[in-house]
Image (cartoon, rainbow, N blue to C red):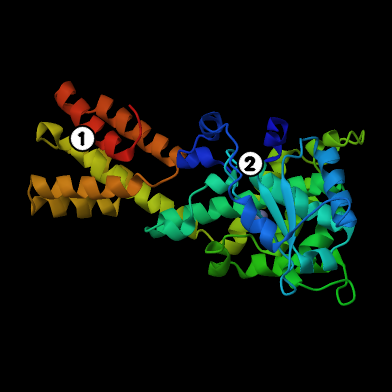
Amino acid sequence: MDFLEKYKYHKDNPEEFGIDLKKFKKLNEELDNSHISALLSTSIRVSKDLIPSVAKAIDQVFKRIKIENNFNFFVTPNSLQANASCSLMSSASRPDIILTSKLVELFSEEELQFVIGHEIAHYVYQHGLYPNPNNAEENNFKLNILNLSRSAEISADRIGFLACNSLDHALRANLKLASGLGEKHIKFKFSSYLDQLRELEDLGNNSGELWSTHPNFLIRMQALIWFSMTKEYHEFFDTKKKGTYTLEEIDRKIENSIKKITGNELERSNKEIYERALLWGSLNIYLSDKKFSKQEQGIFAERFGKKAEKAISFLKFSNKDVLEKKVNDSFVEAANLLRSYKTDLSGELKKLASETDGDKTKKQNILSRMLEILGSKD
Ligand SMILES: [Zn+2]
């Protein structure tokens, strides 16, 4: 399954949240089938004899993406929503993929392949282990998790695309999922939908998108179109074509497109927390020798501008405990940042500690305490 790893969208990176999927896989080897009885009593298990068209679509998918089929597929009665889900996603269980009856009614065999591939990807990439945005207490953390969740959908769409090997069907499937409509009503003029995406980008600052677990269907369609133009896609199917872009290039294009729609809120909010921790952390290091020389003040002011002035005048009127509280609060908050931010933050603080005056052991202790709160090793 690991060969599918390289098709992941670059922002679909659980390591940024301290999740090590490899470790998790090693821990769980026994299969747990306890969940299946509920499904057996309410849904039909897909087999060649009972639902041949769906069974055929499934077979085709596994042939294309070259992994072993250890999944259970079910069709469940739901005439309202064209939907699919993958349940029990830890590697300890045999995963179930559940398709609604409306989905099967509305989708062609190739479009079903897209959806099936998409759900398989959620299992292969272990997206079920990602943190749940509903459990996040802090806004910035929640925004980061939502961004991860949207990124996971883009990765899953790519496997869906490889599973059906047709851009046209992948896009049709997306439109049907987004609209709930079938071919009787919908026109598949993809360029018109992309006009709608450009309009959305021009408007910007769409907070609905920022707080959503799934990217909107326009971004997903655009991401698929770009994916169809990559070198990696052509290599997968050995088309002998070179492709216009690399995956890395389209990942950046997608990221830009998303940023245009959501605005800079996510970046701004992460940066703000980063800067706050760095400011109080730096002061903590500077003041480790109870002195704050003119030269140090100069460097500090240059780095933090107006915020430096504020912090200094604040400290003039407060005692050591107040600084400690500021450091503690800002580092507890920063502990929820993405790993790359935390690595940068500890790097900057270490550098500062090595450049400032004062007793080395004292500085080292202060630094270690801050990095400990941050959850980043020194
Ligand atoms: Zn999904």
Local secondary structure at mark 1: helix
Label 2 amino acid? Tyr
Q: Nearer the viewer, mark 2 or mark 1?
A: 2
Work out how far the residue at label 2 is from the one at label 1, CA to CA, in angstroms.
Answer: 41 Å
Q: Nearer the viewer, residue 168 or 352?
A: 168
Q: Nearer the viewer, residue 143 or 87?
A: 87
Residue where numbered disc 2 is placed: 125
Residue 48 in the image, given as x and y percentages of width and height = 88, 50
Left/right placement of residue 196 relative to residue 275 reads: right
Residue 239 in the image, given as x and y percentages of width and height = 92, 36
- Decide: is 56 above or below 41: above
Left/right placement of residue 55 relative to residue 264 reads: right
Does any portion of residue 331 appear in the rendered image? Answer: yes
- The residue most toward the top is 360
Taking the spot 85% from the left edge, 72% from the top edge, the residue there is 182
**Quarter of the rendering containing residue 294:** top left
- Decide: is 113 above or below 13: below
Residue 114 in the image, given as x and y percentages of width and height = 80, 53
The quarter of the rendering in which ligand 1 is drawn is: bottom right
**Quadrant occupied by the N terminus:** top right
Residue where numbered disc 1 is placed: 285
Label annotation for residue 322? none
**Quadrant occupied by the C terminus:** top left
Q: Nearer the viewer, residue 256 or 148?
A: 148
Residue 160 in the image, given as x and y percentages of width and height = 77, 49
